[in-house]
Image: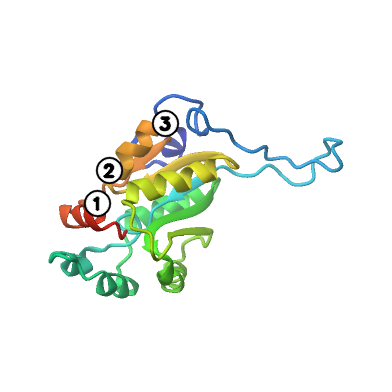
């Protein structure tokens, strides 16, 4: 279990493979948190808090009511995302994010398409969740979620310390753990193969 997971009292499965606690994966580097003035080394901003990178669907948002749109092939992705504003919040995930937000900066990393940004912001605000950076998949991006999120994390890790990643998708979790990221799998909502198969074959979330 990661140090962040232990501190937050997380009920889930976290793993870290190598590297310093809460650091970037092997081969990565975290940007210095102190900015100096004129090269004199004088601190200008306080030390940045480490990042907690959190998925949305299946972590804080209950998607079960809209999985019916994906059970046919091809899935009706427009209807799937259009129904997202009606997602009930997942209590365990919401409470976890609030605990992490005490000493982490929250970054949302979701496979939802960019066109659903406004609805996603509104939903997060309605649940009282931190409105930190929201990283979303470009509308024309069809990569599997694990590939998209790996690329996004690598970008984040070049400039900031990523202390914990929370995701419910087993394929995402396995890949990121193999890369050395400190990952917690959200297990408070059973992961359905309907969504996993659609993600891998159609690359939409």
Identify the image quadrant of residue 204. bottom left
In this rendering, the answer to whether 73 lies above or below 145 is below
Of labels 1 and 3, earlier in sequence is 3
Return the residue nearer the eye: 103 or 114.
114
Residue at point 64%, 44% (across, down): 48
Which type of secondary structure does the marked residue at label 1 adopt? helix
Q: Are marks 1 and 2 in contact (CB under 8 Å)?
A: yes
Q: Label 3, on which residue?
A: 180
Of labels 2 and 3, earlier in sequence is 2
Residue at point 38%, 64% (across, down): 140
Q: Are marks 1 and 3 in contact (CB under 8 Å)?
A: no
User: Pointer 2: residues within 10 angstroms few (<14), some, or many (20+)?
Assistant: some
Residue 144, horizontal then vertical, whole percent: 31, 51
- What colour-coding does the image apply? rainbow
Left or right: 131, with 82 as reference point: right
Q: Label 2, on which residue?
A: 171
Which residue sits furthest left?
Answer: 72
Residue at point 84%, 43% (across, down): 37
Measured Cα–Cα span from mark 1 to mark 2:
9 Å
Q: Label 1, on which residue?
A: 200
Left or right: 26, with 160 as reference point: left
Of labels 1 and 2, earlier in sequence is 2
Return the residue nearer the eye: 188 or 64.
64
Left or right: 174, with 19 as reference point: left
Q: Are marks 2 and 3 in contact (CB under 8 Å)?
A: no
Residue 5, horizontal then vertical, whole percent: 41, 38
Residue 109, horizontal then vertical, whole percent: 43, 54
């Amino acid at each position: 279990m990661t140090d962040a997971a232990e501190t937050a009292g997380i009920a889930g499965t976290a793993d870290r493979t190598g590297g310093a606690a809460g650091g970037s994966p092997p081969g990565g580097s975290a940007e210095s948190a102190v900015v100096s003035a004129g090269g004199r080394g004088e601190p200008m901003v306080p030390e940045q808090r480490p990042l907690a990178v959190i998925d949305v669907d299946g972590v804080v948002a209950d998607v079960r009511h809209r999985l019916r749109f994906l059970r046919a092939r091809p899935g009706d992705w427009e209807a799937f995302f259009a129904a997202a504003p009606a997602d009930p919040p997942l209590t365990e995930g919401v409470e976890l994010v609030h605990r992490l937000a005490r000493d982490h900066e929250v970054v949302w990393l979701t496979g939802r398409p960019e066109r659903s940004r406004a609805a996603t912001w509104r939903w997060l605000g309605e649940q009282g969740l931190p409105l930190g950076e929201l990283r979303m998949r470009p509308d024309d991006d069809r990569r599997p979620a694990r590939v998209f999120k790996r690329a996004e994390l690598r970008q984040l890790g070049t400039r900031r310390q990523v202390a914990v990643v929370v995701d419910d998708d087993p394929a995402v979790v396995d890949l990121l753990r193999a890369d050395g990221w400190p990952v917690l799998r959200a297990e408070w909502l059973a992961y359905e193969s309907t969504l996993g198969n659609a993600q891998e074959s159609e690359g939409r979330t």
